Image: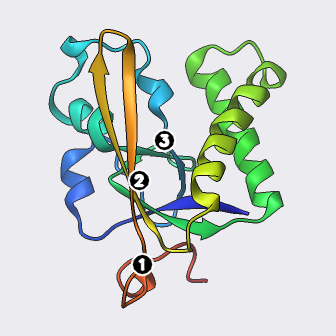
Amino acid sequence: MKLARTIRLDESDDNVFESPASAGEWAISGGFEFSNWSEDDLTGKARQAFSNGWLSLESFGRATFVAVAPITEAEYEALTQTLAQYFVDHYGAPDIEAALPVAKDELDHMQSMCEDHEDNTLLMVSRSLNESGIHESYRFNSPQGASLETFAVHGSVD
């Protein structure tokens, strides 16, 4: 089973996102956060989060890049619970039971996007706002030469 972890190729995320994610956090697209946005909301750091930011599932910060990484079933289930609780705490879901199917759908979407890619494949998201809503597109760069571990840490070094 695979999902994506945030990576930091440099310190630019600290400058472009209001709340940057740390390297190694599990991540999903997080496009749902922008579902009620209009052009008026797309200014400054919020515009960058909308345009190119992945949502981490630990700090709920944003990252420009994520990379495919293996995940255990237990980690996946814990992330589903965490995201469901986030929906309750920040989006008014009535309770965790109501939020769990939506959280699972978000994680399943990301997992299906990652499953057919090699570990360390770099993923980028691009969003635009049009009359019918938000359009998301994804780009993938397969690992070549040096492993991404040369440049980014995918988790704890403990």
Residue that numbered label 2 is attached to:
21
Q: Disc 3 or 2, which lies upstream in sequence?
A: 2
Contact (CB < 8 A) between labels 3 and 2?
A: no
Q: Amino acid at mark 1?
A: Pro
Q: From the viewer's perspective, is residue 149 above or below residue 3?
A: below
Q: Specify whether 4 is left or right of 102.
A: left
Q: CA distance from mark 3 to mark 2?
A: 13 Å
Q: Pick the quarter of the image with the N terminus.
A: bottom right
Q: CA distance from mark 2 to mark 1?
A: 22 Å
Q: Position of residue 97 (x, y in %)?
A: 84, 23
Q: Pick the quarter of the image with the C terminus.
A: bottom right
Q: Amino acid at mark 2?
A: Ala
Residue that numbered label 1 is attached to:
143
Contact (CB < 8 A) between labels 1 and 3?
A: no
Q: From the viewer's perspective, is residue 90 above or below residue 28?
A: above
Q: Say which element carries label 2.
A: loop
Q: Nearer the viewer, mark 1 or mark 3?
A: 1
* Numbered badge on residue 29: 3
